Image (cartoon, rainbow, N blue to C red):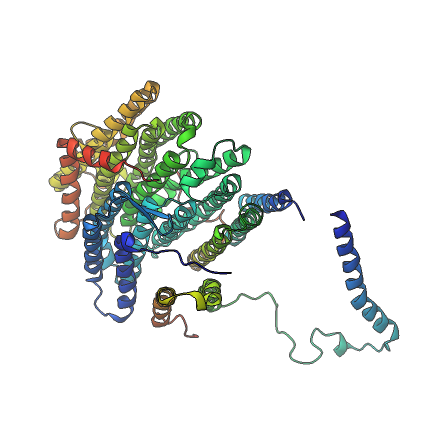
Amino acid sequence: MLKQFGFLGVHAIIALSVPLLGIVAAWLLRPKKPYPLKKTTYECGMETIGDTWVQFKAQYYLFALIFVLFDVEAVFLFPWAVAYNKLTLFGLVEGILFVLILFAGLIYAWKRNALEWQ
Amino acid sequence: MIPLSWYLVVGALLFVIGFYGALSRRNAIAILMSIELMLNAVNINFLAFWRYLTPKEMAGQVFAIIAITVAAAEAAVGLALVIAVYRSRDTVSVDEVDLLKG
Amino acid sequence: MTITLPSISLLPYLPEIVLLITALLVLVIDTFAGEKRWLVWLALLGTIVAGVTTWSLSLGPTLYLQDMLAADPYALFIDMVVLIITAISLLLAYDWLNSHAHQQGEYVALLLFSAVGMMTMGAATNVITIFVALEILSLSLYVLTGFARERLTSGEAALKYFLLGAFASAFFLYGVALLYGATGHFDLVGIGKNMAGTGLMAAAGVALLLVGFSFKVALAPFHMWTPDVYQGAPTSVTAFMSVGAKAAGFAAFLRFFHVALAGSYATWGPALAALAVLTMTWGNLAALNQESVKRMLAYSSIAHAGYALVGLAAGNALGMSGLLFYLLAYAFMNLGAFGVIIMLEKKGSGDLSMSALRGTAREHPLLAATMAVFMFSLAGVPPLAGFFGKFYVFGAAVKANMTWLAIVGIINSAISAYYYLRVSVLMYMVEPDENTTDVATNNRPVLAFALLVALVFVIGIGLWPGIWMQMAQQAAALLG
């Protein structure tokens, strides 16, 4: 088994050295003409104003929550969809019921203005 | 093939790291993250046991998905509670949330 | 790969489905309706329909959903206990909900979701089903605990409950994984069959599961959250979770130990007995000098978890039916005691101090008498429900050659009499002063009705314990 890990190690070294080689070559070959604008975080685009560690609006969190709802729903729908052809009508109804229950949650979130950006 | 015990050791280590974090951190969100780490450490165990012990049965794999779902629900409820407390108290440190005692 | 669809019959799960549909309906209607007062009645109707369904579904003992759940007399008994608790809790919350009208739908729906989790726990024959049911019930309770947004203590209680509860569920899940690794099974029967000859891993798994269970039913030394959470939560929620979570937790606890670990009683019997002694002693001693009535009842509920655990530690048939009887009796007397607190607490305070009880018997003679009945029952004075609950579980301990455990229990009951009687002494034998609560209690018919129901059952179970014990004995037939 150690041998197999050895192969993995050799592979990792080669994989790492390819991009490193490119970066080192570029560093050696490039002309060096630094000026202030070039050293900014974004060479083009807007400078950030104030501290970058700002507090996020709690609204983002609501969206994230609803995202998690559908995210996890997809986890369960994926095996259902893969086996879809072999499922009978009962399987279809079960799947629809499952989505409907989550849909009730979505209606609730919607009516409570959770999807509204304030 | 990597022996089963390696996975179990990784799972146990992650669980212990989460355990330590949950006990030592004072920030409610950090504690929540530590607990999530503990739950996911268990998932490693589920999948390792499934692969090595009962690969013909779906149970271990399916239950890992269920555990992930439960962890997601837990995170959602937990974060909502933390935000509710933050809005009224302006702190998420469990040391400063101490009206109830006795 | 061919997929063979398992035969799925959801019929035995109908009571839970009825409750679930009611909860979803409440949630959706709530967002459209202007007048929300009747949502409680809708929920109550759903609870009653679920109860009728439970009663009429005489399918005979059967395992369903691929042996994940059982429809046996045991599960039906727990279903009925949970439904009764839910119905009374809805009534207890009625007045509070009218002053929190905008949250009414969520409260009712979460209560019903939690009840679904409790009922599922009673029926679960698979550790993963137990885990999911436990989470359904706990997640709803976490949110309910934080429902009194106007009080800082409510949110604090919810946060504490959540952090410790999630921590405990991680232990529980790890225990499930280790048991699966040791036995290759998730179902209790399979675990039981493969338990022989397993070593340290299975033992560690059982120990971790025990930690998770102990947390949920508040056994010492995993009870630290109980007083804070019970005090901070809205009183109607405290009433619900003190009896509901306990009934559901013990239901799953008992099934796990009697089905999966039936062969190794010699190991877990003494361990649970030790845990019972620790729990009831700790709870009773801590309850002695509490200034908040809710906090006192929180410690008392820890002590009662200890008494109930005696029935489980005895490990015999009498212990099993005694525990079921105890859960039923405890439900009524504790719901009643919290109901009286709801009556007397100042609006928005969410708590009641011992000194506020001073001389309340003058103003509210009926209420004081009711409270006295609940307190005597909790203390175990015959002929009330609480006495027979203790009588049966301690009797089971004697039968299992654990007379010492029964004696410790009786000594503990004597200690507990001090703080239960203190409540009645304060209400009857002390002059009212400026601390005495001054709320009006005469215009709360719904709450009074809930108290009356609890009172009738506490006295009724006490006067005719035989009928109820017979029900508990029939229910003690575990499937699997």
Considering depth in this image, is B71 or A75 the residue closer to the camera?
A75
Q: Residue at x 29, y 53 (%)?
A: C13
Q: Position of residue A61 (x, y in %)?
A: 47, 65
Against C110, residue C470 (above or below) is above
Against C443, residue C248 (above or below) is above
Q: Position of residue C134 (x, y in %)?
A: 38, 47
Tag count: 0
Considering depth in this image, is C282 or B95 the residue closer to the camera?
C282
Q: Residue furthest bottom?
A: A44
Q: Residue at x 44, y 57 (%)?
A: B73
Q: Residue furthest front?
A: C2
Q: Position of residue C160 (x, y in %)?
A: 43, 47
Q: Residue at x 30, y 32 (%)?
A: C320
User: If the image is split into quadrants, where does the C terminus of chain A sit?
Assistant: bottom left
**Relative to residue B70, is residue C116 drawn left or right?**
left
Q: Position of residue C412 (x, y in %)?
A: 31, 25
Q: Residue at x 86, y 78 (%)?
A: A31
Considering depth in this image, is B21 or B85 the residue closer to the camera?
B21
Against C165, residue A33 (above or below) is below
Considering depth in this image, is A77 or C292 the residue closer to the camera?
A77
Residue B26 visible, this angle: no
Residue B73 visible, this angle: yes
